[in-house]
Amino acid sequence: MPFNDEKQCVGEDQPSDSDSSQLSESMASLSDCECSGQSFTSDSSSKSSSPASASPPKVTTFDEVMAAARNLANMTLVHEIAVNESFELKQEVLPENSLVSRVKHIVHQAFWDVLESELNADPPEYDHAIKLLEEIREILLSLLTPSGNQLRNQICEVLDIDLIRQQAEHGAVNIQGLANYIISTMGKLCAPVRDDDIRELKVTGNIVDVLRQIFHVLDLMNLDMANFLIRSLRPHLQRELVDYERTKFQEILEETPSALDKTTEWIKESVNEELLSLSETTSTPGAENSAKPSLSPILVLNNSYLKLLQWDYQKKVLPETLMTDEGRVQELTEKLNQLKIIACLSLITNNMVGAITEGLPELANRLKRIATVLLEGMNKETFNLKEALNSIGVQTCVEINKTLMERGLATLNPEVEANLVGQFSSIKEKDNPIWSLIDKRIQLYVKSLLCHPNPQKGRPPMPGGLAVIQQELEVLGCRYVNIVNLNKQVYGPFYANILRKLLFGEEAVGKTDTSPSAN
């Protein structure tokens, strides 16, 4: 997919010579286009934005809110189609005993019962049947390709509703014959995967059951056509995605000026952390103010992206610019938490009994598989992590003792086993040194990936202690870098505006004007 563009990395220990040139050069890599001609000069960035000169607050109407919501829904759908190769529409399956399922069944059954009673009447009534045939005709026509003019004309001729209505008035409608024609036409239009479904459609004595099954298969054919169109459009959407999303988000921003508030706060946290880090390394009076322009925008933004891998989804909402990737980022975060614990367990095991288990790779792999299984679903609220860690500890001791006995060696004494289980159980306690160490090393690795010119061709070295999860971490890191790269391409101009104000603006951090009038 065309979303792995190379990006430029600005090192922490290489601040730029001037605030304006540094921001301009660094932010250029966030987007594949100019930032709408916006000035990056130090003069413009240093102008204060007083309340008197600021734009008046915009009153947002209900229609504008709904328009912004529609834009966001459309943008999210297009983004999902473009970046998710396995995305497809699926038939809705309601829980069998749910209220919605029962109501739907009752309503549908009532409709088919009415149709059956009409057709069994003497003389038969065709009002509902004609409406069904009209709907079937429209569905068949919608499944045609632009070149299917001959079949289109035939469908319109055979399923001529006016003619069928006239026939009904004289009791001359051949419902079974029309059903046979519909089934034959469906066989010409369906995807190969539906051939068996079409063959099962046979006109029997109960025409109502046949019509019901025809509608069921037509629903499946509609899904097939929609998914075919999705696959056909995906390459085009991938080429146009950056411009499309950027334009749509600008429309959202115009309708909802506060649509970048959470994004601004997210980036502001990284700015303040970097300023605090600089202030702690210098004792010069006023060093914080003088160091502010020297912050690297790329470094600040990459640190913001790192925060997403430690996000608390129960308490915090993602920045607006990451909403279209929320599911993917959350999935990666949850998987990363599991990998962290597995790395911690491996490190504790190696530290305590490494001399005994050294040179036994099969044992290490078996212990990893056990931990992975027992940690499945660890991000659910109902998951008892402490109990799972205790179980992993007990099972680890069992496997180690089993391996030692097979080799005629002495098993672990009870004190070592208790110590091992206890250290496993305490991994997630506050300020646990093993957890902190592994977390820092993983953050260092992902940060190196974000700064790497081309992670696909060459990856930075894996920090020590992470060998047990190296393969999974490399895959996860590359997936995350792909998300970040696309996000930078789409929202680069918006990030540039925010960083310009946070790094160089004289107004208070957190009161950045993100309305269109600021552009």
Image: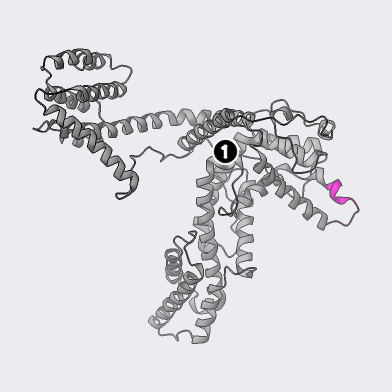
Q: Position of residue 316 (x, y in %)?
A: 60, 51
Question: Which residue appears at 23% of the width and 33% of the height?
Answer: 111
Q: Residue 466, image x and y in percent?
A: 56, 62
Please give left or right for residue 48 compared with residue 304 in the image. Answer: right
Q: How is the image coloured?
A: one colour
Answer above or below: position of 450 versus 187.
Answer: below
Amino acid type indicated by mark 1:
Leu
| Residue drawn at 29 percent across, 33 percent down | 219
Is 96 situated above or below 344?
above
Report the quarter where the C terminus lies.
Answer: top right
Query: Badge 1: how crowded within 10 Å, few (<14), some, or many (20+)?
Result: many
Q: Report the side of 51 relative to 70 (left or right).
A: right
Which residue is disc 1 drawn over? 486
* Residue 208 falls in image quadrant: top left
Q: Residue at 65% x, 38% y: name it.
A: 260
Q: Is residue 88 above or below residue 270?
A: above
Which of these two is toward me, 220 or 487?
A: 220
Residue 500 appears in the picture as rendered: yes
Towards the viewer: 459 or 11: 11
Q: Quick one: 456 or 272, which is closer to the camera?
A: 272
Quadrant of the rendered image containing residue 405: bottom left
Q: Which residues are magenta?
A: 282-291
